Image (tube, rainbow, N blue to C red):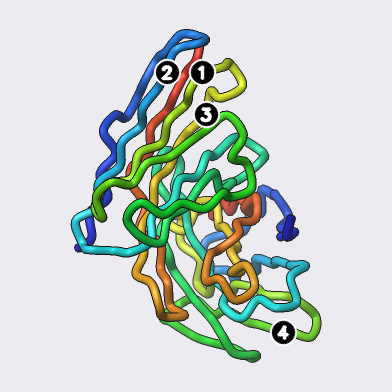
Amino acid sequence: DVKVTQSSRYLVKRTGEKVFLECVQDMDHENMFWYRQDPGLGLRLIYFSYDVKMKEKGDIPEGYSVSREKKERFSLILESASTNQTSMYLCASSLRGTPNEKLFFGSGTQLSVL
Amino acid sequence: QKEVEQNSGPLSVPEGAIASLNCTYSDRVSQSFFWYRQYSGKSPELIMSIYSNGDKEDGRFTAQLNKASQYVSLLIRDSQPSDSATYLCAPEVGGSYIPTFGRGTSLIVHP
């Protein structure tokens, strides 16, 4: 089975801190995604990547950046954390090039910014 | 921004009944449609995908797609308490194979 691993399940940071959320997948998937999930707002796409060193903005990229130096790893960076970035962050991966692009999700990181 | 509309619920059905979950979407170019199930405190998992107009059945689940009406639905037959979860409709953004998620419908199946 595909495994998508997020480095932390819970994270507490202070306003203004630089925050790194790490995600690793073990199935050689080309596509990787970062979503945030908030009550009543559903899943919203922050950034995604089709390949190493490649990134594309999603629907809500403001305040975030990403890094993909290796195929299996996709990092989300909060340059200066703010309280409105308190959320559940979900990483996902999928194969590219087929219509049946099932997303495999990690277990999520609940980030609290105080 | 592409719109995906779902009734937030909760939709409450008795055990053994048919649960009907509905979704409308705004992107006319969408070709692939997905239903994800998310249990409380867990990550979403894919349960159905559909690409052509009509019905697609998989066990107790049936996905229905009408592209002309921009409507997709999920029927769950013989609902079980273990089906209690939030169901996320996710049409792909036209031609990209990247799903856009609706806010989800909460389903409660009571014994």
Task: Tally the numbered discs.
Answer: 4
Labels 3 and 2 share a subunit: yes
Mark 2 element type: loop
Q: Where is residue B111 in the image (x, y as percent from the top left)?
A: 50, 53
For the residue marked with disc 3, what is the amino acid? Ser
Neighbor class of circle 2 (other Cα within 10 Å; few <14, some 14-19, many 20+) is few
Q: Which amino acid does label 4 sit on?
A: Asn
Residue at coordinates 48% horizontally, 33% vertically from top-left? Answer: A88
Q: Do the residues labelled 1 and 2 touch (CB within 8 Å)?
A: yes
Q: Mark 3 points at which residue?
A: A87
Between the C-alphas of marks 1 and 3, the distance is: 12 Å
Residue positioned 65% across, 69% down in the render: B20
User: What x and y, as percent, mark residue B102?
Assistant: 65, 55
A54 shown above or below B20: above
Q: Mark 4 lies on which chain?
A: B
User: x, y percentage for residue A13?
Assistant: 42, 13
